[in-house]
């Protein structure tokens, strides 16, 4: 996502995904070993973005920020949060309601979305909602 602003920098932001290998729990231990300011920041495996959000919100990152990940669904989630947050939140709320009606069946239905041919025809917002819901609620 080089040179793309993910969120309006006048507001703080937190990771919106729980991600395997996330650094959220390690931040208190590693922050004392970080420089006070970064001239360039490259995150090759952004995942949930805990390190990035922490550094950005605390003023360590001023410019030349590059966030990368090889997972296209993860990148889609970041872009959707940036461009379609309201629609995304509505869809996540719909997923939550469906899950609460029948957690067992809904879990398998949601898990199988990307195993179906029609998955690629789903909107980027639907795919992002599924990804965020799946990583945070299931």
Image (cartoon, rainbow, N blue to C red):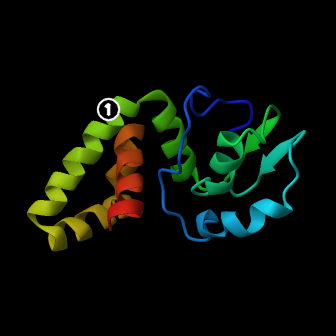
Q: Residues within 10 Å of mark 1 (few under 14, many from 20)?
A: some
The residue under the point 74% across, 36% down is: 2
Q: Can residue 123 be seen in the rendering of this structure? A: no
Tell me the quarter of the image containing the N terminus.
Answer: top right
Whether 99 is drawn above or below 104: the answer is above
Residue 134 position in % (x across, y down) = 36, 61
Q: Is residue 28 left or right of residue 34?
A: left
Residue 95 position in % (x across, y down) = 23, 52
Residue 138 position in % (x across, y down) = 32, 68
Which residue position is annotated with label 1?
Answer: 87
Whether 98 is drawn above or below 37: the answer is below
State the residue in front, 12 or 95. 12
Disc 1 element: helix
The residue under the point 57% across, 31% down is: 7
The residue under the point 23% across, 64% down is: 109
Q: Can residue 67 be seen in the rendering of this structure? A: yes
The residue under the point 88% across, 52% down is: 35
């Amino acid at each position: 996502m080089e040179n793309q602003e993910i969120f309006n920098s006048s507001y703080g932001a937190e990771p919106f995904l729980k991600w395997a290998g996330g650094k959220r729990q390690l931040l208190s231990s590693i922050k004392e070993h970080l420089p006070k300011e970064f001239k360039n920041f490259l995150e090759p495996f952004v995942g949930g973005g805990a390190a990035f959000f922490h550094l950005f919100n605390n003023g360590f990152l001023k410019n030349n920020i590059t966030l990368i990940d090889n997972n296209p669904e993860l990148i889609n989630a970041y872009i959707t949060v940036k461009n379609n947050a309201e629609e995304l939140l509505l869809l996540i709320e719909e997923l939550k309601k469906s899950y609460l009606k029948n957690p067992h069946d809904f879990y398998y239905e949601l898990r199988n979305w990307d195993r179906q041919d029609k998955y690629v025809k789903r909107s980027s917002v639907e795919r992002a909602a599924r990804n965020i819901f799946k990583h945070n609620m299931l």
